[in-house]
Image: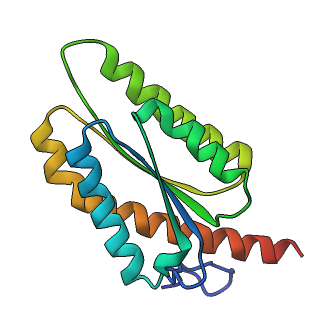
């Protein structure tokens, strides 16, 4: 819904048809990862993404996600990427390190490669919080990835 009549406003586009999507999922906190993945894939299919255009890679933990995303981005085979995982607070400072560095890594890959990345890495205080949020966050990551891929295409077309 346009807010102004006198300016060009690009509307969100959630049409997933013809998009190629890569997903990187952390196996650490696997129950949450699988919940994120299930909701994400379900939403991708709901938005018209062809299952044959989705590639899933799993990595040991959240700190490994950015490298896998970078490798996938550099193949030029994907319109957008999705990062899925869960970092759950423990009793040490490790939570802060992993949360901060994985988020920074995802953002760096996105900016360095120009490939949109939906960050679906949950950071929660407890397992219960992660389990409660995983379905919503997984579906949200799918919608963000589709919207950003379509926005990227539109902006690329405007450059020509």
- Outermost residue toward the top? 92
| Camera-nearest residue between 100 and 42 | 42
Tell me if residue 139 can be seen. no
Residue at 54%, 41% in the rendered image: 106
Q: Residue furthest right?
A: 160
Q: Is residue 111 above or below residue 16?
A: above
Above or below for 108 versus 39:
above
Residue 102, given in percent of the width and then of the height, sits at 47, 33
Count of numbered circles in the view: 0
Relative image position of residue 150 (x, y in whole percent): 61, 75
**Residue 127 in the figure: left or right of residue 54:** left
* Closer-to-camera residue (78/160): 78
Apparent side of residue 140 relative to residue 69 in the rendered image (left or right): left
Image quarter (top left, top right, bottom left or bottom right) of the C terminus: bottom right
Decide: is 48 above or below 159: below
Q: Is residue 151 visible?
A: yes
In this rendering, position of residue 24 left or right of residue 32 = right
Position of residue 128 measured from the top left corner of the image (x, y, whole percent): 9, 42
Query: Looking at this rendering, what residue extends furthest in the left direction?
Result: 128
Q: Give the left or right position of residue 131, taking residue 94 as reference.
A: left
Question: What's the residue at 46%, 30% (across, down)?
Answer: 63
Q: Position of residue 105 (x, y in %)?
A: 56, 34
Q: Nearer the viewer, residue 145 or 78?
A: 78
Q: Residue at x 40, y 60 (%)?
A: 141
What is the quadrant of residue 109 in the picture? top right
């Amino acid at each position: 819904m346009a807010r102004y009549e006198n300016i060009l406003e690009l509307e969100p586009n959630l049409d997933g048809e013809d998009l190629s999507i890569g997903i990187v999922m952390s196996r650490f906190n696997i129950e949450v990862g699988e919940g994120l993945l299930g909701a994400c894939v379900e939403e991708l299919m709901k938005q018209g993404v062809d299952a044959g255009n989705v590639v899933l890679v799993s990595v040991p933990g959240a700190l490994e996600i950015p490298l896998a995303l970078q490798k996938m981005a550099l193949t030029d085979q994907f319109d957008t990427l999705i990062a899925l995982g869960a970092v759950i607070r423990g009793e040490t400072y490790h939570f802060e390190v992993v949360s901060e560095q994985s988020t920074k890594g995802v953002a760096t890959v996105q900016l360095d490669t120009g490939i949109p990345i939906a960050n679906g890495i949950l950071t929660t205080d407890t397992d219960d919080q992660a389990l409660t949020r995983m379905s919503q966050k997984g579906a949200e990551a799918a919608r963000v990835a589709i919207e950003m891929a379509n926005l990227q295409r539109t902006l690329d077309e405007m450059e020509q």
